[in-house]
Image: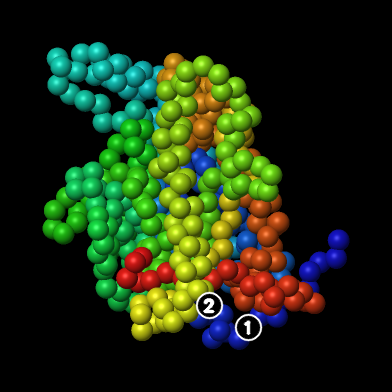
Amino acid sequence: MTAPSPLPVPPPAATTTRRQQTALIMMGGGARAAYQAGVLAGIARIAARHGIAHAPLPFGILAGTSAGAINGAGLAIGAADFQAAADSLAALWHSIHADDVYRTDVLRVGASGARWLSSLAFGWATRRAPRALFDNTPLGGMLGELFDGDRVQASLDAGVLNAFAVTALSYSTGRHVTFYQSHRRIHPWHRSQRMAVEARIGVDHLLASSSIPFLFPSIPLEIEGHHEWFGDGTMRQMSPLSPAIHLGASRILAIGAASGARPGQTSGWFDTVPAGGYPSLAQVGGQALASIFLDGLQADLERLLHINRLLARMPEVAGDAEGWRPVEVMTISPSEPIEAIAAAYVDRLPRTVRALIAPLGGTEARGAAFASYLLFEPAFTQALLALGERDAAAQADELAAFLYGVLPANDRRFEQAPPARQPDASQAA
């Protein structure tokens, strides 16, 4: 195979402007977030093949939620060298184990199961409810070793990163809060049940954003002079594109964790597994978690497409004077159902975890969606890394054009079919 010719790189000023206005959005999904790392590794390889290796991130704005916030943190501390940052993330996901994220020993898992059982059976007598099904103390320890807030600030000070945002949900008030750091002063925004807070992002923010409801405990964070308890930021996140737009993005790459529908195919995977009988608790839980983790991004994108069609009919409405501005959006989502991949690897979960979720149906094929969020095991995460790299390679030309503003030699396709411009308004974001 002939190596691609180096891309005609735009002038440095144009490249910097494009990067500063381009955002990367990564949503949650527990162990599914390994797919995001695979896509990023694929993008870094595309850049390297075209002579843009070891340059700063092509995204000046990083907005992450749940496990996507952790991936965003990995990019933020290494923003000066995208290749190195992507390689580090891929290496982390390549070798991760469940006990790096939550306690899997017999004593702790058994005690947790006993507490939940006694609470359900004798809650009136114990008067003490369990906080979560799993203890994610190991994740806090790992993040404490890997995450360096000073390096994030150094990336911002050097101008290789414009803004880094992490979103979490306050159990105390029901507000959806985006914590952000930025290179320049950005006024915090307030919307109905949504707000932004300027803060120096630390390990606690990452833990709070990634605390999957019921599975991991909530985390206290300081806000407006007092502490509130926070959980996974994908809960009630109806506008996942909003933080990036408020932080100045005019172009967004969004990496999803739900398989996209293809012509002639259904968008789900449940037609491929036995559907007879009453749904198991894991099957119900998998659908509930899907509504939390997977549905918000697609719904927000559909709203942007709808607004785009309206503005095409009413061009006089589109304009900075009205508060509206166009936002280009490109998305990458798994080309294969992650649930089906999880079903093949659910037996790789630690024995204690399998014993805990088996009565719920979590080890059955139809419960694999639930298990996928906990499957922090190399066989599964490596499969997702490979899938992410393949999906990035399949869109290599589109990604090169979208992120770097350059076209492969003798390729004029994007002049006729540029990436769709999706409008959004700072008023509505």
As drawn, is 248 to the left or to the right of 81? Answer: left
Q: Secondary structure at mark 2?
A: helix
Write down the residue under mark 2: 18
- Quadrant showing the C terminus: bottom left
Write down the residue under mark 1: 10
Q: Secondary structure at mark 1?
A: loop
Residue at the spot 69% in from the left edge and 77% down from the top edge: 415
Which residue is nearer to you in this view: 36 or 257? 257
Which residue is nearer to you in this view: 284 or 120? 284
Q: Position of residue 174 (x, y in %)?
A: 23, 47
Q: Is residue 260 visible?
A: yes
Q: How many marks?
A: 2
State whether residue 385 is above or below residue 378.
below
Q: Position of residue 225 (x, y in %)?
A: 13, 58
Q: Position of residue 64 (x, y in %)?
A: 42, 56
Q: Quadrant of residue 133?
A: top left
Residue at the spot 60% in from the left edge and 63% down from the top edge: 83
Q: CA distance from mark 2 to mark 1?
A: 10 Å
Could you tell me the amino acid type at mark 2? Arg
Q: Quadrant of residue 317?
A: bottom left
For residue 49, which numbered disc appears in the image? Answer: none
Which residue is nearer to you in this view: 382 or 360? 360
Could you tell me the amino acid type at mark 1? Pro
State whether residue 309 is above or below residue 28.
below
